[in-house]
């Protein structure tokens, strides 16, 4: 059978399954109709594996470029509430 939205490999079941929305750590590739794993630094991503929407626990998001960093770049301050680097 073919999936309407996305296919992801289910590690527990050991086979592919269809999903409407890809889980955290994956983004939906609309051309391939597959859930593709995000970069290891990204908790969530969109459109490609390196365009992070949120970061894993020890990293902070630079929302302008969608990259997760250990430290803020010059011109940004760290906010622990949203875990984003805020431009100043």
Image (cartoon, helix red, strand yellow):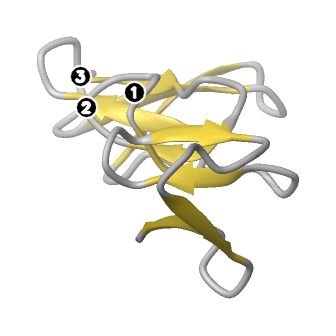
Distance between the Cα atoms at labels 3 and 1?
6 Å
Q: Which residue does the numbered mark 1 point to in the structure image?
A: 7
Q: In which quadrant is the C terminus drawn?
A: bottom left
Q: Is residue 51 left or right of residue 54?
A: left
Nearer to me, 85 or 2:
85
Percent from the top left, x then y, of residue 41? 70, 33
Badge nearest the viewer, 2 or 3: 2
Q: Which residue is mark 3?
A: 33
Give the quadrant of residue 85.
bottom right
User: In terms of sequence position, does the residue under pointer 2 or pointer 3 come before the other?
Assistant: 3
Mark toward the start of the polypeptide (3 vs 1) = 1
- Label 3 with label 1: CB-CB less than 8 Å: yes
Is 62 on the left-hand or right-hand side of 72?
left
Instruction: Report how far apart the C-alphas of labels 2 and 3 lie in the structure.
Output: 12 Å
Q: Residue at x 22, y 12 (%)?
A: 32
Q: Residue furthest toward the top? A: 32
> Mark 3 and mark 2 in contact (Cβ < 8 Å)?
no
Q: Position of residue 39 (x, y in %)?
A: 60, 23
Under circle 3, the secondary element is loop
**Any part of residue 54 in sight:** no
The residue where tag 2 is placed is 47
Using a 10 Å C-alpha cutoff, classify the residue at mark 2 as few (fewer than 14 neighbours), some (14 to 19) or many (20 or more): some
Check if mark 2's residue and mark 1's residue have beta carbons within 8 Å: no
Compare residues 5 and 74 and report the one nearer the observer. 74
Q: Secondary structure at mark 1?
A: strand
Residue 87 visible within the image:
yes
Query: Where residue 71 sits in the image (x, y, percent)?
Result: 75, 46
Q: Secondary structure at mark 2?
A: loop
């Amino acid at each position: 059978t073919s999936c309407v939205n996305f296919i992801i490999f289910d590690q527990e079941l050991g086979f592919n399954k269809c999903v409407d929305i890809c889980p955290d750590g994956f983004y939906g590739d609309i051309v391939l109709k597959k859930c593709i794993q995000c970069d290891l630094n990204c908790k969530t991503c969109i459109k490609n594996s390196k365009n992070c929407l949120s970061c894993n626990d020890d990293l902070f998001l630079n929302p302008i470029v969608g990259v997760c960093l250990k430290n803020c770049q010059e011109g940004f301050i760290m906010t622990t509430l949203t875990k984003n680097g805020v431009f100043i």
